[in-house]
Structure formats: structure tokens, C-alpha cells
Image (cartoon, rainbow, N blue to C red):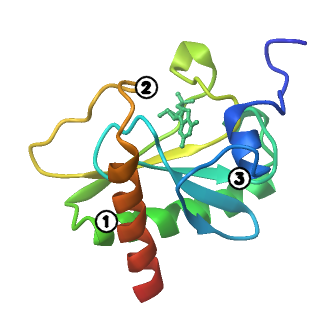
Amino acid sequence: MSAEAYDDQNIFARILRGELPAHKVYEDDASIAIMDVMPQGTGHTLVIPKTPSRNLLDADPEALANLIRSVQTVARTVKDAFEADGVTIIQFNEAAAGQSVFHLHFHVIPRFEGVALRPHTGSMEADDVLAAGAGKIRAALAGS
Ligand code: DGP
């Protein structure tokens, strides 16, 4: 397999197939959003397309266009849900750039004045904290 091939055994592909659990907060025809288990900040959410691609570089442009709409929806929702001052969007392409799961995804991270991001792929968050955050996002989506 070449370094740039898509491997359908990656963690997000398995979550999309329902083979692994996740705190899912959003779903539409093209994407899901789940809580990141190693959050860089409160409410760190991942938006993941259902269409397989390794990252942005090999993604179908139409799928990307659909995905960015979901990213905007989730960004607006998490900003409201956590009463954040801003939202950081991050997306890594290949290991050299910091990518560790090779299925395209966007990081959506609520930001608060004076609060720095925690390290990328740092420590695992407690499951009850993730569940509570997911509940807030679902409630905000239901109210929007
Ligand atoms: P990256 O590929 O570098 O953009 O980061 C992948 C992110 O995915 C990282 O923030 C940690 C997170 N992550 C890794 N494994 C899992 C998992 O099994 N479930 C969830 N929800 N997130 C994961």
C-alpha cells in the first residue's frame, strides 16, 4: 500500500460504520460530528465526511464543499453551546503536518479569551466530560 492510500480500517471509518463507539453530536447526509477524545479545549469536536478520503488533498471537491457547510453548522453550534468567544478550525494533511487519523476531518474548537489550546493528541478526556459536552451541543442544535 502506498503512503497516500486510503485505509478503511482507520478509526473514523470504523466509527462511521458503527464498529467503534463515539459521542456523536450531529449527522447529515454527508457527515457526522463527534467529540474528540483528546480535546485541545472544552467542546473540541471533529467533523467527519461519510465519503472516504485520506485528507483534504485527495478529497472530492464536491464532498469538500458539502463538508464545509457541516463545519460551519457545528462551529456556530459549539460557539453557542459553550458561550465561547471564538472558534478555531484546524485540519491536518499527512503525518508531517500533524495528521494521525487518515480519514479527512476538521477540528472545531471553541475558544475563550486568555485560554490557550492544549497539545494536539495530548491526554484522553474522561468519558463523562465528553458526554456532558456532547449533551450541550445536542441541546444547542435542538434549539437552533
Ligand atoms: P489528526 O489526525 O492529527 O487531525 O487528529 C486526530 C484526532 O482524533 C485527535 O485530536 C485525537 C482524535 N482521536 C483519536 N482517536 C479517536 C477516537 O477513537 N475517537 C475520537 N472521538 N477521537 C479520536
Query: Which residue reaches farthest front?
Result: 128
Q: Give the quadrant of residue 120.
A: top left
Question: In front of the other: label 1 or label 2?
Answer: 2
Mark 3 → mark 1, Cα distance in angstroms: 21 Å
Other-residue count near label 3 (Cα within 10 Å), few / some / many at <14 / 14–19 / ≥20: many
- Can you give x and y, in whole percent of width and height, for residue 2 in the image? 87, 12
Q: How many labels does the image show?
A: 3
Q: Is 3 left or right of 79, judged from the image as shown?
A: right
Q: What element carries label 1?
A: helix
Residue 100: x and y in percent read 58, 23
Closer to us: 34 or 74: 34
Instruction: Identify which residue is drawn at 83% across, 28% down.
Output: 6
| Disc assigned to residue 122 | none
Is label 2 within 8 A of ligand 1 (CB to nearest ligand atom)? yes
Return the residue at label 2. 121
In this rendering, does residue 144 appear at all? no
Residue located beneath label 1 in the image: 79
Whether residue 12 sits left or right of residue 86 in the image: it is right
Measuring 37% from the left and 64% from the top, which residue is drawn there?
78
Q: What residue type is labelled 1?
A: Lys
Quadrant of the image containing the N terminus: top right
Tell me, yes or no, whether the two marked residues, 3 and 1, touch with CB atoms within 8 Å. no
Provide the residue designation for mark 3.
49
- The amino acid beneath tag 3 is Pro
Q: What secondary structure is found at the residue carrying circle 3?
A: strand
- Label 2 amino acid? Thr
